[in-house]
Image (cartoon, coloured by chain):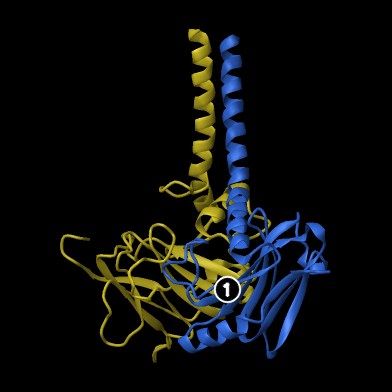
Chain colours: A blue, B yellow
Amino acid sequence: MRRLGLIAAFLTLAIAAHAATVWALPRVVMNTTMTRLETTAGGPNRPLRAPPVDETSRRVVRPAPDLIYTACVIDSGDGPVTVTAAGWAVYTSVSLFSGNTDNVAVFNGPWPDDGAVTFEVGEGEMELPGDRGIVLIRRIAGTEAMQANALAAQENDDCRRVE
Amino acid sequence: MVRLAGYAAGLLLALALGAGSALWLSGWLPMGSPVVAAGGISVNGWVTHRAIGSEAANPWLRAYVARRGLLALNRSEAIYYTRYDDSDGAPLNAACAYVVEGQPPEGGWWSLTLYAADDYLAVNGDNAHSVNADGVSAGNDGQWRATVQAEPPGDGSAWISSRNAGRYSLTFRVYQPSPALQDDPSRLAPPRVIRLGCREGDA
């Protein structure tokens, strides 16, 4: 009887360790990534206009070298955050990721070159489960000429807390 | 005292077993994830999963995405197909040369990217990590083609460098997939990865 109890305790512990590890892995990775990104950006709710992806890009696994990225670590604990994506005449997307890696919202363009699209994270279709997450603006830049234009457009991307 | 040591050893063993199996099933160990593989879709060797990036992902897939594809979009926006072998089933190898050819997929835009074994771009200074819909034209037969090998092909054709990539993988991204492809990712007309040859002794 005692042996059965020990076996049950062993299995219970193993299952609990398994569940805790699986639960924690995405959250730890996202939290580490958010910390790295916001450190580089100078804080949360600030845009990080990433340079073109190359072989030295090591912040996030499997980066796409055909895209230009702007990232923003969202902290909506003190209220909604606005994200502005500058216009881009070919494919672009604005996506929101929660602290467990889920892509909880995504919108895509093209949007007019001379226009910009603003989203409010914490409202409507940009709801974030929890206070923290990442917004990623992707712009297709499949050629060198497109890359130069995308980098220029990226200068007008922004994110900031609603005052 | 001996009994106490036995309990401590049992405790540590249970924790190690639980954590180790979690890493294994989530694809954090080199042998891949059987849970993710079981729920995945393979299209002639190109593997994807319907729930990547989705709130419907199970906990093991979510942990897998954290390790192998952080910030992946859900399939309403992009579908990611990855393979580790050629069309004959042999592992992709930097010592070999391949032609990849296929039809433009049902979607808005596509790209094909090579990732080294560490899931980052290969460190080789070649700046030839991918080809995409804007950089490759379809031939008369409607197929696009790219050469994957360690040296430039020298004929001006599209090239992805596998130099210093070791045992690498290829990821085919389809952005803004058609509703039909979103609904059934196995509809992809899969690009073929044809091995041309390998350096003697390295294959």
Given residues A119 and A43, the one toward you in this image is A43
| Residue at the farthest front position | A42
Pinpoint the chain carrying mark 1.
Answer: A
Q: Position of residue B95 (x, y in %)?
A: 24, 65
Q: Position of residue A42 (x, y in %)?
A: 64, 64
| Residue at the farthest left position | B200
Residue ID at (62%, 58%) = A34
Residue B16 vertical position relative to residue B60 in the rendered view, above or below? above
Q: Is residue B119 visible?
A: yes
Residue underneath mark 1: A69
Q: Quadrant of the N terminus of chain A?
A: top right
Q: Is residue B43 visible?
A: no
Residue B68 vertical position relative to residue A158 in the rendered view, above or below? above
Residue ID at (52%, 67%) = B80
Given residues A33 and B10, the one toward you in this image is A33
Q: Amino acid at mark 1?
A: Tyr
Residue A22 vertical position relative to residue B16 in the rendered view, above or below? below
Q: Is residue B147 left or right of residue A143?
A: left
Residue ID at (33%, 63%) = B165
Q: Secondary structure under badge 1?
A: strand
Q: Position of residue B69 (x, y in %)?
A: 53, 60
